[in-house]
Image (tube, rainbow, N blue to C red):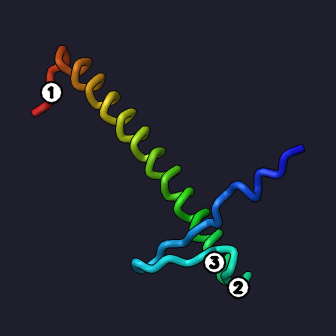
């Protein structure tokens, strides 16, 4: 069985235009980095959800406009 971990470069954190070897950071900082990664992932997920909702809303508005064309508005 091959150990691929030796072939992988060390993960690098780039923060404020500075680079850090994540493996050499204290555990407390590694946990903060993990938390930031989770937060970024959740933000992307919710941004994608908002895009889907916006497209759905736009589609519903177009459908409403078409269906209201034959309805007389009130004054």
Quarter assignment of residue 62? top left
Kindly identify which numbered label has been placed on residue 65.
none
Residue behind mark 3: 32
Circle 1/circle 3 CB separation < 8 Å: no
Residue behind mark 1: 73
- Residue sitting at x 61%, y 63%: 38
Instruction: Give whichever of discs 1 and 3 has the lower sequence position.
Output: 3
From the top left corner, tell me how far across and down residue 55 is, in percent. 36, 35
Total numbered badges shown on the rendered structure: 3
Q: Nearer the viewer, mark 2 or mark 3?
A: 2
Q: Is residue 42 above or below residue 27?
A: above
Q: Is residue 15 above or below residue 39?
A: below
In the visual, does 32 lie left or right of 75? right
Q: Secondary structure at mark 3?
A: helix
From the top left corner, tell me how far across and down residue 31 is, in percent. 69, 76
Residue behind mark 2: 26
| 15, 1: nearer the viewer | 1
From the top left corner, tell me how far across and down residue 46 is, in percent. 50, 52
Q: Secondary structure at mark 1?
A: loop
Quadrant of the snapshot with the C terminus: top left
């Amino acid at each position: 069985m091959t150990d691929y971990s030796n072939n992988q470069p060390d993960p690098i954190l780039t923060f404020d235009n500075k680079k850090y070897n994540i493996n050499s950071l204290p555990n407390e900082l590694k946990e903060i980095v993990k938390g930031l990664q989770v937060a970024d992932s959740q933000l992307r997920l919710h941004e994608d959800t908002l895009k889907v909702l916006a497209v759905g809303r736009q589609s519903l508005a177009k459908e409403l406009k078409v269906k209201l064309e034959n309805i007389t508005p009130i004054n």
